[in-house]
Image: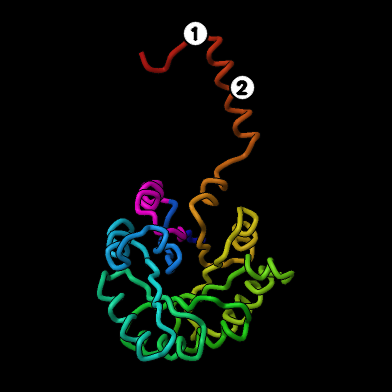
């Protein structure tokens, strides 16, 4: 499974990129707004910090303006993936951008039918929001399973399933068990995946035993 980090924090992206844990980045208008900086500048910096896809979202809702914004975003760097909403205008924009060889991430997916339509529109990525479905009492992971089952039936669908609205490590593990292509996760979730209390306890015991020997590996 690939990890895309869901943030616009350049410092955090750079730190995580150095570990090899990050295969790409996803942003949205809310994340960009938190930086207080110019959107285009932030996207350029993120694209320079990672080799993988960087999702940059349009802010218009009509097709003509979305298409213009999409082309503008795609000009920023070769690894930009234009993010569009899963609406009729968004999918038409997806089709037009994909026809020009531009990767498109279709976001705000909440049903298998929507995912099917996005794949037919040529989306490079579909972003189902599992956490938001869980919030209203539905099963977000069942949506992932349904989308994967549909996509597996058709060789012509090259759309990757990018699990979004991830709230914690349990979502990541469940998505990985289902075979999802990508999880886009906040930095805190990536750090949480590394942690376990028994690891800390075991390390403390090893170090205590080593201290008793009075030895040093280096000089």
Q: Earlier in the sequence, mark 2 or mark 1?
A: 2
Residue drawn at x 38%, y 70% is 56
**Magenta span:** 4-20
Identify the residue position indicated by label 1 in the image: 214
- Helix, strand or loop status at disc 2: helix
Q: Are the residues tagged 2 and 1 within 8 Å (C-beta)?
A: no
Query: Dot 1: within a 10 Å radius of its alpha carbon, few (fewer than 14), some, or many (20 or more) residues?
Result: few
Q: Up-down: is 73 above or below 153?
A: above
Instruction: Estimate the x, y position of residue 128 in percent, counting from the top left.
Output: 57, 73
* Circle 1 SS class: loop
Residue 197, percent across and down? 64, 35
| Magenta-drawn stretch contains 19 | yes
Looking at the picture, tell me which residue is in the foreground, 134 or 152: 134
Q: Is residue 21 left or right of residue 173?
A: left
Query: Which residue extends farthest right?
Result: 137
Q: What residue did someone put label 2 on?
A: 205
Query: Dividing the image into 4 quarters, which one contains the C terminus?
Result: top left
User: Residue 172, which numbered label?
Assistant: none
Badge count: 2
Residue 16 to residue 208: above or below: below
Relative image position of residue 143 (x, y in whole percent): 65, 74
Q: Which residue corresponds to the image point at 46% horizontal and 61% vertical from the top-left?
A: 4
Q: How many residues crowd around disc 2 within 10 Å: few (fewer than 14), some, or many (20 or more)?
A: few
Q: Residue at x 65, y 60 (%)?
A: 174
- The colour scheme applied to this rendered structure is rainbow
Q: Is residue 100 magenta?
A: no
Along the horizontal axis of the image, is 197 left or right of 21?
right
Residue 218 x, y percent position in the rendering: 37, 17
């Amino acid at each position: 499974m690939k990890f895309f980090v869901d943030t616009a924090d350049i410092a955090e992206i750079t730190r995580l990129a150095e570990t090899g844990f990050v295969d790409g980045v996803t942003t949205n208008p809310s994340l960009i707004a938190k930086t207080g900086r110019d959107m285009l500048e932030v996207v350029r910096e993120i694209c320079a910090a990672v080799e993988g896809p960087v999702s940059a979202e349009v802010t218009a809702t009509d097709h003509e303006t979305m298409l213009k914004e999409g082309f503008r975003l795609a000009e920023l760097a070769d690894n930009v993936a234009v993010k569009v909403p899963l609406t009729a205008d968004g999918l038409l924009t997806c089709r037009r951008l994909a026809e020009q060889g531009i990767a498109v991430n279709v976001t705000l997916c909440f049903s298998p039918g929507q995912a099917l339509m996005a794949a037919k529109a040529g989306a490079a990525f579909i972003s189902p929001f599992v956490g938001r479905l869980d919030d209203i009492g539905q099963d977000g992971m069942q949506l992932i399973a349904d989308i994967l089952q549909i996509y597996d039936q058709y060789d012509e669908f090259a759309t990757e399933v990018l699990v979004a609205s991830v709230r914690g490590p349990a979502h990541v593990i469940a998505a990985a068990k289902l075979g999802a292509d990508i999880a886009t996760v906040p930095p805190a979730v990536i750090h949480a995946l590394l942690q376990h209390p028994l690891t800390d306890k075991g390390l403390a015991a090893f170090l205590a035993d080593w201290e008793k020997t009075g030895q040093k590996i280096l000089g």
